[in-house]
């Protein structure tokens, strides 16, 4: 019995597609206002971003990166926030139970750009790097918003003191930034808690 061409393509395409989504990245809709003005600056237009799983495969994040992570408050929800501080950094908090926090090893401090309208580390504290699922690299929709997402920390939210990063992590980041890759994507929503 011979399989029709469609079924052969399906049997090959599904595993390849799943592998690309799992290893390379995907496109996701950003909901909410917690990342305004970087994402969804106009409440009537929803941004879609490319989330690169490849960029965080070694738990390599930098201050200023916009990342997708599993919510520490609700493990069924993914949220998108900006990395403000890394392990060893001392950060001045905004309404957290302590006025200053030293980010523990293997953790980062994340915040929404729309201060006061974001459920972030100022509510739940430092976040384990194990919860990070991807890094937002570009806005891919709508066409009027096509752009790379820069890794910058607002001046008012920079750490008071910066910890030292292991040399292996810092050097691997510079190598990965210098190379570019092509990718395939599909659409999945990513919520924002605000």
Image (cartoon, rainbow, N blue to C red):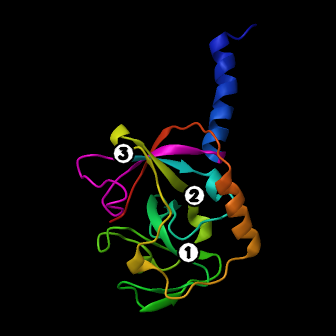
The residue that disc 2 covers is 133
Mark 2 or 3, closer to the camera: 3
Residue farthest to the bottom, as pictured: 99
- On the rendered image, what quadrant is the N terminus found in? top right
Image coordinates of residue 5 in percent, x first then y, are 67, 11
Residue toward you, 41 or 30: 41
Q: Main secondary structure of the magenta part?
A: loop
The residue that disc 3 covers is 145
Separation (CA) of disc 3 from disc 1: 28 Å
Residue neighbourhood size for the residue with mark 2, other residues' Cα within 10 Å, grouped as few (<14), some (14–19), many (≥20) = many
Tell me which numbered mark, 3 or 1, is placed earlier along the sequence.
1
Image coordinates of residue 67 in percent, x first then y, are 51, 61
Tell me which numbered mark, 2 or 1, is placed earlier along the sequence.
1
Image coordinates of residue 2 in percent, x first then y, are 74, 8
Q: Residue at x 32, y 53 (%)?
A: 40
Q: Pointer 2 and pointer 3: residues touching (CB < 8 Å)?
A: no
Residue toward you, 52 or 147: 147
Q: Residue at x 41, y 85 (%)?
A: 93
Going by the image, does 26 lie left or right of 14? left
Q: Pointer 2 and pointer 1: residues touching (CB < 8 Å)?
A: no
Residue 41 part of the magenta-drawn span: yes
Write the start and end of the magenta stretch as one range. Answer: 23-46
* Badge number at residue 155: none
The residue that disc 1 covers is 108
Helix, strand or loop status at disc 2 = strand
Q: Residue at x 63, y 58 (%)?
A: 56
Q: Pointer 3 and pointer 1: residues touching (CB < 8 Å)?
A: no
């Amino acid at each position: 019995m011979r399989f029709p061409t469609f079924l052969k393509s399906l049997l090959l395409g599904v595993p390849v597609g799943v592998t690309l989504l799992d290893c390379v990245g995907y496109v996701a809709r950003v909901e909410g206002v917690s990342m305004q003005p970087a994402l969804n600056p106009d409440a009537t237009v929803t941004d879609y971003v490319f989330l690169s799983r490849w960029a965080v495969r070694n738990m390599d994040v930098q201050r200023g990166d916009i990342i997708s992570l599993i919510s520490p408050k609700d493990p069924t929800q993914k949220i998108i926030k900006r990395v403000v501080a890394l392990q060893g950094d001392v950060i001045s908090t905004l309404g957290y139970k302590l006025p200053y926090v030293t980010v523990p090893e293997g953790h980062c401090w994340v915040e929404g750009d729309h201060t006061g309208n974001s459920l972030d580390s100022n509510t739940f504290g430092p976040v384990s790097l194990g919860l990070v699922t991807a890094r937002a690299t570009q806005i891919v929709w709508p066409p009027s918003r096509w752009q790379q997402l820069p890794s910058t920390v607002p001046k008012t939210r920079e750490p008071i003191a910066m910890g030292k990063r292991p040399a292996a992590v810092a050097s691997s980041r510079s190598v990965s930034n210098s190379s570019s890759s092509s990718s395939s994507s599909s659409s999945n929503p990513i919520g924002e808690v605000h």
